[in-house]
Amino acid sequence: MSLAGETNASAQAGANSVNWLRLLPWGLAVVLLAILPFVFGSGAGLTVLNQMAITIIFALAYNMLLGQGGMLSFGHAVYMGLGGFFCVHLMNRVEFDGLWLPLPLLPLFGGLFGLLFAVIVGSFSTRRAGTVFAMISLGVGELIAACSIIIVAFFGGEEGVSADRTMGPALLGIDFSSQKEVYYLSACWLLISAAAMYLYSRTPVGRMANAVRDNEERAEFLGYSQRKVRFMSFCASGFFAGIAGALFAINFEILTEENLNLATSGSVLLITFLGGVGFFVGPIIGAIVFTLLQTVLSLFTEIWQLYLGILFVMTVMFFPFGLTGLIAIHFRPYQLGKLGTLIIPYALIAGPALGFALGSACVMEILFHARHAALGDETMTLLGVSFNSHSPAPLLLAVAVAGLSVWALRKLLPAFKDAWDEANHAGDAS
Amino acid sequence: MSAAAIELEGMCKSFGRVEIIRNVSLSITKGERHAIIGPNGAGKSTMFNLITGKYHPTSGTVRLHGEVVDQLKPYEINRRGLSRSFQITNIFAKMTVFENIRCGLLWSMNYKYSFWHLVDRQPGLTARAHEILEQINMADKHATLAGVLTYAEQRALEIGITIAGGADIIMLDEPTAGMSASETEYIVELIRKVTENKTLVVVEHDMGVVFDLADRISVLVYGEIIASDTPQNVRANPAVQEAYLGTVLEGAD
Ligand SMILES: Nc1ncnc2c1ncn2[C@@H]1O[C@H](COP(=O)(O)OP(=O)(O)O)[C@@H](O)[C@H]1O
Ligand SMILES: [Mg+2]
């Protein structure tokens, strides 16, 4: 399965020479990251890109636990948040005490602070996997979130702590006053971190993290302490989460309680699962989709979190391997040269699927507007049409569209399933 | 004379109030092929678990090459050169056959908890894994996920993982259970081949296999060893015949 489960055929061939094909995705990523600001060069575009880079690092770090190590954490924002807070303080030391620290190196210190804290917490939380680990992570998360309000000197109370990133020594005349400079800094750290995390998964301890995840007993009888393997994954994950926190500090120049509370811990779990925990690229895809939905959807609707929640539940129920899994299952039809046969079946169900999504979204929007809009404000605009949200006709129409779509979907699905099976079936069906 | 490979002295184990292993003393010399037989529930697997650190004895001692090990963890015992398989297939089902073997090799090849080696770029490691795949005749299956192998193949892979680390004491818990006659024959040949010059402890129900493989047999009944002797003497032992009601041992030759 996935990148993590690569076989040795390539390893054998590439034991001494670099396998160029495997470097291709990384090369593409470098090019893509380099040209993105020219495509989305606006302030808002760069903000979204920066946000994405930070979220990707955080989600990849999180998946070192969940996907690679089988540890479900409900409190991983702690390590990103603490790394971030530490960096905000460092930036202030640079500004007020003349500490010599070039900004590009700051993420390293954020990482080390995340690592330090992961060493402390991991020393007792990784003793067991499963529920015990999950509960400890939740407890520590709650604890740190509570501390953030109590220990004002470090966490700054409700306003948080802010800093100015441009006060450090400028290298090559770059002082990071522009968004674009910050973007390239984030992009560099994204590449370094992603590559390091991928390589970690290919080291002995990274491989044994998988082994312990799948069968901790067997791993112990092969000479490995399951606890130490988990501890090391945990520390590595804390380190990279800290880097993400540092980049957050650089990008937003402020950290608040929100950066380490349980809601943030919850969303990284959601992001990772959405993307697919079984794949190295899963969290990357999850982070991109999540950030897009968060920024774009929230422009159009107040209840975007509801849609995100529905998307998450549907993913868990229908696509447990996440969006990446959804892409991956098309690989076999592609190999068999039958991907083309799926175009028409997909086109057929696309209409009703879209109808269902839009219909039910309209129902929710109308109900939300009718209940929550200011008193007397009864006109709403959906899909370019203005109408009275309190009159029954639009609601009934939306319900009818959704209902009809479901009916059509149920009619069409058996045929789609047949086409799918056929596309996954080697040899010609005649 | 050097110390015995495995030495049990007055070993007892109770789960709650039930005494499962009662005062077992046994010495297995280096290079010996020792079979443990006994009816279901006699405590054979529990004995394995006590020796390999999964459980700790309630009283008594376990020595490995003369060193007391009964309070050590499984991984510490493994590092002292003892490796075991399980009665119920215990492999990494979601990994490829090759990766299963490689996991069995990592510690013994001194990679330990390294995060500065890349496993795919260790020619020695890869070569050794392929050697073991050859030994267990699974070279052509190296890229298959262990979970989709047939039962017999999984058992063979389990033996491969067990011997991969080069342990000098190999303990196999019912390696041929649930296999057809031809599969059994194949596995026995495999065991013979891969445990050459090693100390072998094997729990086995198939008496043909036991008499074929073992230099010495211990009979465990209700947590007690009622006989521990050469195959001939065990077969002739009246207490053993009584425990087995004279049925099982007859067919064995
Ligand atoms: N962890 C345990 N807790 C309680 N009882 C156990 C445990 N492990 C084994 N037993 C009991 O010990 C007895 C011997 O089991 P086992 O060693 O598996 O026998 P054998 O391998 O000889 O068939 C059985 O009655 C079993 O129920
Ligand atoms: Mg047993």
Image: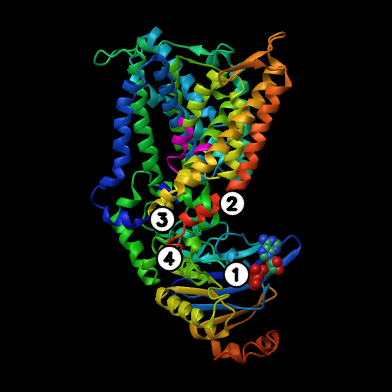
Specify the amino acid type for callout 4: Ala
**Residue B124: x percent and y percent?**
29, 58
Q: Which mark is residue B37?
A: none
Check mark 3 vs ligand 2: CB closer than 8 Å? yes or no.
no
Q: Nearer the viewer, mark 2 or mark 1?
A: 2
Q: Is residue A158 above or below residue A140?
A: above
Please name the residue that numbered disc 3 is placed on. B107
Q: Which mark is residue A414?
A: 2
Q: Is residue B15 left or right of residue B107?
A: right
Q: Which mark is residue B9?
A: 1
Same chain, labels 3 and 2: no
**Which residue appears at 54% of the width and 86% of the height?**
B208
**Residue A376: x percent and y percent?**
71, 8
Identify the secondary structure beneath mark 3: loop
Using a 10 Å C-alpha cutoff, classify the residue at mark 4 as few (fewer than 14 neighbours), some (14 to 19) or many (20 or more).
many
Q: Which residues are magenta?
A: A274-288
Ligand 2, seen in the image, is in the quarter at bottom right
- Residue A225 shows in this picture: no
Please name the residue that numbered disc 4 is placed on. B167
Query: Between marks 1 and 3, how big is the CA–CA gap?
Result: 30 Å
Provide the major secondary structure of the magenta segment. Answer: helix
Q: Are marks 4 and 1 in contact (CB under 8 Å)?
A: no
Specify the amino acid type for callout 1: Glu
